[in-house]
Structure formats: structure tokens, C-alpha cells
Amino acid sequence: MSDTVRDLVVGFFAAALISGLASERVQRATERQLRRDLRTHDLRVRIDQAGPLGMLFGRASVVRVGGSGASLDSAPLVVRPGAGLSARVRSIRLDLRESAAGDLEVDRMQAHFSDAWVDVGALMRDRIVVRAAGEGVASIMVGEDLIARLASRRFRASRNVVARVTPDRLVVSADVELLGARSRVEVTGRLALLDGARLAVDRPSVRLNGLLLDEAASAGLVAPMNPVIDLGRDLRTSMKLRATAVHLERGQVRLEARVSLPVESCAPQGVEDGSS
Amino acid sequence: MLTLTGVTVYYGAIRALDGVDLTVEAGEIVAMIGANGAGKSTTISCISGLVRARSGSVWFDGEDVEGLATHERVERGICQSPEGRRVFANLSVNENLDLGAYIHHRQRSRVEADRERVFGLFPRLKERSRQPAGTLSGGEQQMLAIGRALMGRPRLLMLDEPSLGLAPVLVRQIFEIVRDINRQGVTILLVEQNAYQALHVASRAYVLETGRVVMAGPANELLHDRQVREAYLGE
């Protein structure tokens, strides 16, 4: 091996090492920022560079944000349109467990944005500034406890609300006091998606103390329960969600949704917008 | 129709009822009067099954109902209009009435006849039949609570403080309606702090103090009793 080739090889590995260290630095800096924004300690950021020297040129291929206990009131990432050199990121992936949306807890929220663009200069200065991101896909897992809590909010006269989700039905049961009796109401049905935003019990059957009620008698018990989940009202998050499908699974409801990151119209004063 | 014998109820270590004996005959209006905490509401909660007697028995129509669940007692014809009304605020008047009729809901024409009967007693409810119960006035909610209990076709209707928080003119109206309901053949057990109105409408009455029956007899006799007048009628 000639000296030139050896120097090139050493130089390449040295550059790759520096690039790797830069990637680590960006990850740590972004983690610190997101832990503050999302109010959680359990948050990890992983950045896969685009090629071994990617970070030297401000290039990343995949950005992964994962953790738990986050507050989804703020979006994990915000789109800040601006001038300057941007580089395409193949994928931004979010995976947040047991996170709060408003005062409710979502079991898991996964989102995947392909074709995002990040600011090159900012990335070289240890920050991720998203310049553009298309609509992503999200999968949101809502557990039985959350459904029960929502149902008891809708129907305030109820007590001991329990929700059970199986692959073919949702069952919500609760105690109500009626005519001086502690009565058990059980509403069973499938979930239907309305307007991409609301999930409602569809064609429910209602039992009161084991007695199957007809539609007229049960209407009053079903109406306040619906929608079981209202994405706009219940899952308060600055990300825009539009549900496309709902699946009942054992112990949880899985929502598929189109999701977009909020767009910040202009950088607030005193905050570096990262443009190079 | 209803017989309580030596009923004792505890809330934790506190004795709320102490050997209460009480009877209600079919067709009567029986009043229970007493100060706050005397045990009036506990007595009807015990009859409904919402609280369990530690000792004593509750018989209804020749059946010991102590072992029955609360809803089974409703099925036997014991219905309660609770203190504080507890109507379902986000349901309409009609929906509240439908739930009162849930046991008989398959007999739709009878349910509709019952609804008309309730509207006959409380015309205001008919005017507001589609309105959420939470938007009704206190008096209207009281009417709805009684109406909902009537939809269950009670044989024994227990009214817990029906005049509580109502304006005097409404109180008189409610007691007139209680009398009308009784004339339609419904036996009534009335728990009331307004002793004057209760003793006027009832045929017999019990006076409770600290969980015990301290006086019992025809209502008009109690109405003229010196002790009752001093203690409960402010004289």
C-alpha cells in the first residue's frame, strides 16, 4: 500500500470518526431539546447518517425519536419553512409510548414521515430543523383504560366504568343509579369511523341489568357515549391527525391515521432558526 | 305491603339505624320526618337495598327482600325518586323517562300510556320532552325524577326529600301531585324535612331521631302533637 493510499484510508476513517462523533453530538443535543419540549426524561434520538461521512455534510438518512411519558400537546418536531440549504431525510420515525395527549394517556403512538427535508447548516450546528415534511402515517394504540375514562367523562352519572376490547367488539359497562337501584349497563358494538375524526359505537346492543333493551329504550344510554373517541377533542396534540381506519385488537383499539407535523409560520424572536 | 322489623344499619362504626320498625299498607301515604341525620334516607336506602341491614328484616308483599339485589327490588315494584333528583343530565326528558320504563320497555304501547300519564301529572315535562334534563329548573328536575320513577310502574314509590330546594309555590304543587299519584293507586313512602307539608299529605307518619323511631301514628294526630310542633314545625 502506498503512502498516499494509506493516508487516504486513514483520512477517510478519521473523517468517518469525526462524522460519527458529530452524529452523536446532534443526537444528544436534540435529545436534550426534545426532553424539555415533551416534558419527559425517557426520550432517545437516533440519527443514521447518509453514508459514513454524512454528518460532515449535514446529511442524515433516518431520524428516530423514541421514548415514553411524553406530552403530545407539543409536537416532537415542528416544520419551520425557511431559506437555506436543505437535505432530504429518507425517514423520520416517532415511537412514543404511554404519552399524554391533553390529560389522557395514549398507550402508543407511532408515526412515520417519509420525504422530509432538514436544514443542513443547523444539523452541522447540532440541531434538527425540519424545513419540510410530507404527510406521514401514524398508528395510535388506545387501551381499555383510556376508553373507560372517556366513557365515564361522557356519561357523568356512571360509576365503575370498564371497557373490554376484543377483535370483534367493544364492550363498555358501567353502574348507574336508577329508581333507587344500582344498575349495570352494558353497551356492546363495533366501532365505526366518522369523518376521519370520531369513533362511534356502531349498531350497539344495550343491556340494563342483563335485560336487552330495544332501540328506543337504549338510545339514551348510547347517545352520550358517542363518539367514543374524538381525535380533535380527546387527543389534544398539535400534530394534525385524520383517521383512516380503526381496528379492534385484544385489549386495545388501533387507529391508523394520516398525520402532519405542525408548521411554524415564522421563527419566534430570539430563537435561532438554523438557516445557514 | 312493607314491613321493617328491628332494622339496624351501620356506616362503619357509626350506627345509622337502631332497630327501626315500620309498616306501610297498600294505598297509604306514609311520611317519615326528622332532622338531618335522623336516618330517614338510610331507611329508604335500606328498603331499596343500597345499604344492607346488619340485623332485622325487610319484607315486601310477603317476601323477605333482604337477599335481593337492588334491581330485583325494582322489578318487585319498589321504586325510588332519590334525594337530589339524580336525573341523567345529558339525556333528554324523554330518554330519562324511557330508562325509568326499562323493565317494561317491550310493552311499547303501555310505556307510551305511562308517559302520557306522567305528562298529565307534569305538563311542563311534555313541553320540555326533548330538552336535556340538565337544562331543567330544580322543580322541573324534581318532576322528572318522580315521573321517571312512575315509569317503572311502582307499587311502592319512595320519595326522598321531594321538596328540597324548591320555591314554596312549587313545594305545594309537588305535594298536590303526590296526593294525585296516590289516588291513582300508588302506595307512597315519603321522606321529608318539610314536616308540615308531609304531615298534611300523609295518612300516617313516623318521627325519627338519631336512627330510632321516637313517635308514630296518624299524621293528623302528629300534626297537632305539642312535641312535634315544637321540634319540627317551629312553634
Image: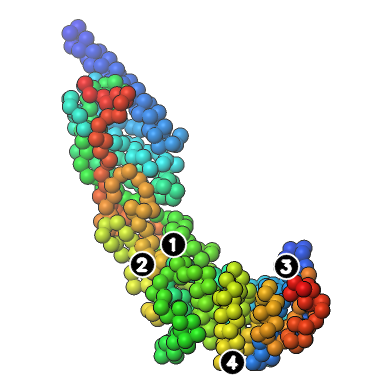
| Residue situated furthest top in the rendering | A3
Three-letter amino acid code of the residue under disc 3: Gly
User: Between tags 2 and 1, which lies in front?
Assistant: 1
Q: Where is residue A75? Give x, y as percent.
A: 33, 40
The disc label shown at residue A201, or none: 2
Q: Give the vertical position of A228 relative to B206 (above or below).
A: above
Q: Which residue is drawn at 26% across and 60% down?
A: A195
The disc label shown at residue B180, or none: none
The residue beneath circle 4 is B183
The residue beneath circle 3 is B37
| Label 2 to label 3: alpha-carbon separation | 44 Å
User: Between tags 4 and 1, which lies in front?
Assistant: 4
Q: Where is residue A18? Give x, y as percent.
A: 29, 17
Residue A33 seen by the camera: yes
User: Between tags 2 and 4, which lies in front?
Assistant: 4
Circle 2 chain: A
Q: Which residue is drawn at 27% across and 52% down?
A: A242
Q: Quadrant of the N terminus of chain A?
A: top left
| Label 2 to label 1: alpha-carbon separation | 13 Å
Circle 3 chain: B
Q: Do labels 3 and 1 share a chain?
A: no
Three-letter amino acid code of the residue under disc 2: Val
Three-letter amino acid code of the residue under disc 4: Arg
| Label 4 to label 1: alpha-carbon separation | 39 Å
